[in-house]
Image (cartoon, helix red, strand yellow):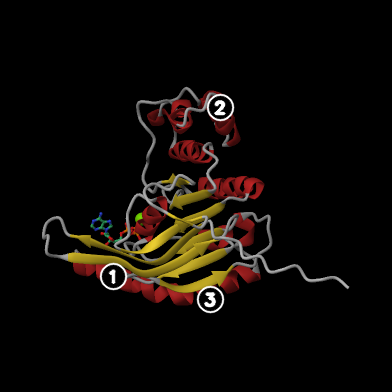
């Protein structure tokens, strides 16, 4: 008789518990805005999780909390079980905005973090990562000499070269045309499948979230944004992001998630008009 294996309770790679973030207005110091409130989410090692939600709801805020760049007003963050104080050194962050150093070449940008960590193999590692993202011949170009897609590839190499256990990505491909975007999404999935790091991926785009992820979390519109839905994406891997979109299961998942997200998008839009 075989004895069933004990249930493993893997420690989450990243865990936000009851996190709230309240900002004080710089123009009117008495005014406060609670962007997110009561957010609990856990990312398992090797899991690819996307967070979707209307613009301005607090997605980047949550990622900043996970990166240790922003201290939450209440709640706590744990990284592989340890309470996070300061910068999350186990995480690599691919920012929403362009973050390459314009005075450094593509190679220099990818090398920077490795040099900072005192790695003697910084150049060789950076060259290898540039090759892996298809930029082997472009190491000597400066950011302004690269296309938008190439700059994003450089940022990707910069993030992955540090071999982080947790990868935080904030709408990394939203500025790209659809073809480049789908190519890069597939590349990210391939790189992820090879190393199986925990990924927290922020996007506006529900199709992208479903195509890439193991799990999709829907945030409500702000203020006090919080998760209002969580969906397991049981589509087979490996996936081609363009092909998977036309499968019946994808469409079913899309309909289910959109039914939760739609009202929040409308509320978020109304909220922004009110502020404007
Ligand atoms: N440092 C800050 N000071 C004051 N308010 C802030 C600060 N950072 C974020 N906010 C506010 O918190 C809310 C959430 O911002 P955040 O950037 O997290 O949204 P988002 O979901 O990432 O939006 P988008 O989809 O447009 O990128 C917004 O209303 C924003 O104005
Ligand atoms: Mg954002």
Query: How far from the left and from the top, in percent, is residue 221?
Result: 34, 70
Which residue bears the numbered disc 1?
223
Question: Callout 2: 10 Å neighbours few (<14), some, many (20+)?
Answer: many
The dot on residue 127 is: 2
Specify whether tag 1 is near ligand 1 (CB below 8 Å).
yes
Q: Position of residue 138 (x, y in %)?
A: 51, 26
Q: Which comes before the other along the chain, label 3 or label 1? A: 1
Residue 85 in sight here: yes
Q: Which quarter holds ligand 2?
A: bottom left
Looking at the image, is mark 2 or mark 3 earlier in the sequence?
2
Q: Is residue 203 visible?
A: no
Side of 2 relative to 221 (left or right): right
* Cα distance between the residues tagged 3 and 1: 24 Å
Name which of mark 1 and mark 2 comes first in the sequence: 2
Q: Nearer the viewer, mark 3 or mark 1?
A: 1
| Marks 2 and 3 close (CB-CB < 8 Å) | no
Residue 32 lies left or right of residue 252; in this view the side is left
Alpha-carbon span between mark 1 and mark 2: 44 Å
- Where residue 140 appears, as percent x and y from the top left, is 47, 22
Residue drawn at x 36%, y 45% as measured from the top left: 97
Ligand 1: does it lie within 8 Å of the C-beta at label 3?
A: no
What is the secondary structure assignment of the residue under circle 1? Answer: loop
In the image, which disc is placed on residue 256?
3
State the count of labels. 3
Q: Quadrant of residue 99?
A: top left
Crowd rating for badge 3 (residues with CA inside 10 Å; few <14, some 14–19, many 20+): few
Q: Is residue 92 above or below residue 104?
A: below
Q: Nearer the viewer, residue 138 or 33?
A: 33
Q: Tell me the SS state at disc 2.
A: helix
Instruction: Please name the residue shown 55% across and 40% down the image.
Output: 163
Q: Quadrant of the C terminus?
A: bottom left
In the image, 3: left or right of 180?
Answer: right
């Amino acid at each position: 008789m075989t004895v069933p294996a004990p249930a493993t309770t893997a420690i989450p790679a990243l865990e936000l518990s009851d996190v709230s973030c309240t900002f004080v207005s710089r123009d009117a110091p008495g005014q406060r805005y609670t962007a997110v409130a009561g957010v609990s989410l856990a990312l398992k090692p090797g899991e690819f999780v996307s967070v979707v939600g209307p613009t301005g709801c607090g997605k980047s805020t949550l990622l900043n909390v996970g990166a240790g760049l922003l201290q939450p007003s209440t709640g706590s963050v744990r990284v592989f079980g340890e309470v996070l104080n300061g910068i999350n050194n186990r995480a690599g962050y691919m920012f929403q905005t362009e973050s390459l150093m314009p005075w450094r070449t593509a190679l220099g940008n990818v090398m920077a973090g490795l040099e900072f960590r005192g790695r003697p193999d910084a150049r060789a590692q950076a060259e290898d990562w540039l090759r892996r993202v298809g930029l082997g011949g472009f190491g000597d170009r400066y950011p302004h000499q690269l296309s938008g897609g190439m700059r994003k590839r450089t940022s990707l190499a910069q993030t992955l070269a540090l071999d982080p256990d947790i990868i935080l990505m904030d709408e990394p491909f939203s500025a790209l045309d659809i073809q480049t975007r789908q190519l890069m999404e597939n590349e990210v999935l391939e790189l992820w499948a090879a190393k199986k790091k925990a990924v927290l991926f922020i996007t506006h785009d529900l199709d992208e979230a479903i195509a890439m992820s193991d799990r999709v979390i829907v945030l409500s519109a702000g203020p006090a944004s919080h998760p209002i839905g969580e969906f397991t994406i049981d589509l087979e891997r490996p996936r081609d992001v363009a092909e998977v979109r036309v499968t019946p299961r994808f469409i079913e998942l899309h309909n289910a998630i959109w039914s939760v997200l739609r009202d929040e998008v409308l509320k978020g839009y109304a909220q922004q008009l009110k502020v404007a």
